[in-house]
Amino acid sequence: MELYIFPVLVILSCTSCYLILPVQPLCHKDESIALLQFKDSLTANNSASRGPAAYTKMASWKAVENGTEADCCSWDGVKCDENTGHVISLDLSSSCLYGSIMSSSSLFSLTHLQMLNLADNHFNYSRIPPELGRLSKLTYLNLSSSFLTGLPSEISLLSNLSTFDLGYVNVSSKMPDFLVNLSSLTSLIMRNCGLYGEFPEKLFHLPKIQVLIFQVNSNLTGHFPEFRSGSPLRTLWFSRTNFSGIIPFSIGNLESLEFLSVARANSLQLLDLSNNLLSWITLPKCLENPNNLLSVLSIKNNSFHGTIPQMCLTDRSLLKMIDLGYNQLEGRIPRSLANCQMLESLNLGNNQIRDVFPSWLGQLSKLRLLTLRSNNLQGQLTNLNSTPQFPN
């Protein structure tokens, strides 16, 4: 008899395997209804989205499909939790949506949402509803280029928010202080939002912040703080703002920094990015502005490529020190440097510059230190003992 017991047990065990296979849960009825109501509150308009891959994602949203109740988890742009069936992600970017999002929108009943992307649609300049703060599980929120306006303080309730993109949204307000309460932020993008007032220094020190993008807010004032060691900051983009003061030496503490742009930040007085590993970075266009207030520029010992920008386009430049040594800069030495009448120190050494020896720099009467070593300069050192000559 014992010879027959074992196979019987195996058969029973395998049969039970089929009985406990998990079944993918369908979308919850109330969430399916909420999504369909949100769809009905908007219209499809091909001109509402500008992205090359735009299409009407909501066209696939139907209450009944093939004679049976549709599963909203299979709709375009909708993702559900595999275990609970709750809608956790809604990606309606570039979906050709037109209309206003009201405070009563059924969208705000989807309280399990972790990701919401409404970018590149046209919401008819409606204000961002404060009810957005109900979606407390959001970690990703993208409202960029959506023709929404304003920014309610209830956003500060989104304590789990990691990425927040409001690019090209017409906020048109004083820089919101409540954003400093979003302690989980890693990326905050508010380019061209019509912001004004003082940029809160605490945003630079959020514990997880990696990306701050605020370019094209011309009335946004502020300054760069003393940066702490261990900061995860990777991107600082503040071009075309009204930031002033200096970029502190402590920017060297930002060991993860990959991108810095302060182009047209014309009130900067000191820019020191020396002794880092920077390569993908834009040199400030304010260097080419004759009205900039920069007196010290040091980016030595990095991996910058490209040509040296035209500096000192007029003799009103305040530059006293330029240190571009130990990079991979190419091309010629810009002749506009002859206008740097306040220049005391110029270091272009250890680059890949190809030019003739710049004897014309001898007309800079205050120049005390000139370093050109380890480049590809040609020509003879002549007329150094007669006018024009370098000072002793």
Image (cartoon, helix red, strand yellow):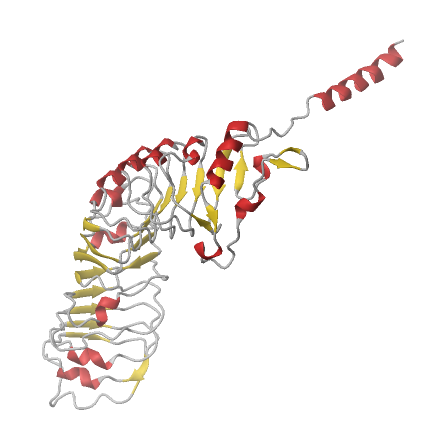
Q: Please give left or right for residue 166 compared with residue 198 in the image.
A: right
Q: Nearer the viewer, residue 320 or 71?
A: 71
Whether residue 293 is visible to the viewer of this picture, yes or no, is: yes
Q: Is residue 55 above or below residue 114?
A: below
At which x and y percent is residue 386?
Answer: 11, 90
Residue 264: image quadrant is: bottom left
Name the image quarter holding the C terminus: bottom left
Residue that extends furthest to the top in the rendered view of this protein: 1
Q: Please give left or right for residue 35 compared with residue 233 in the image.
A: right
Q: Is residue 357 above or below residue 141?
A: below
Q: Nearer the viewer, residue 42 or 153?
A: 42
Residue at the image point whose x is 42% and y is 52% from the top: 120
At which x and y percent is residue 267?
Answer: 16, 61
Q: Is residue 39 above or below residue 55?
A: above
Q: Please give left or right for residue 284 compared with residue 9 in the image.
A: left
Q: Nearer the viewer, residue 134 or 200?
A: 134
Name the image quarter holding the N terminus: top right
Number of numbered markers = 0
Residue at the image point whose x is 41% and y is 41% from the top: 140
Whether residue 377 is visible to the viewer of this picture, yes or no, is: no
At which x and y percent is residue 64?
Answer: 62, 35
At which x and y percent is residue 238?
Answer: 26, 56
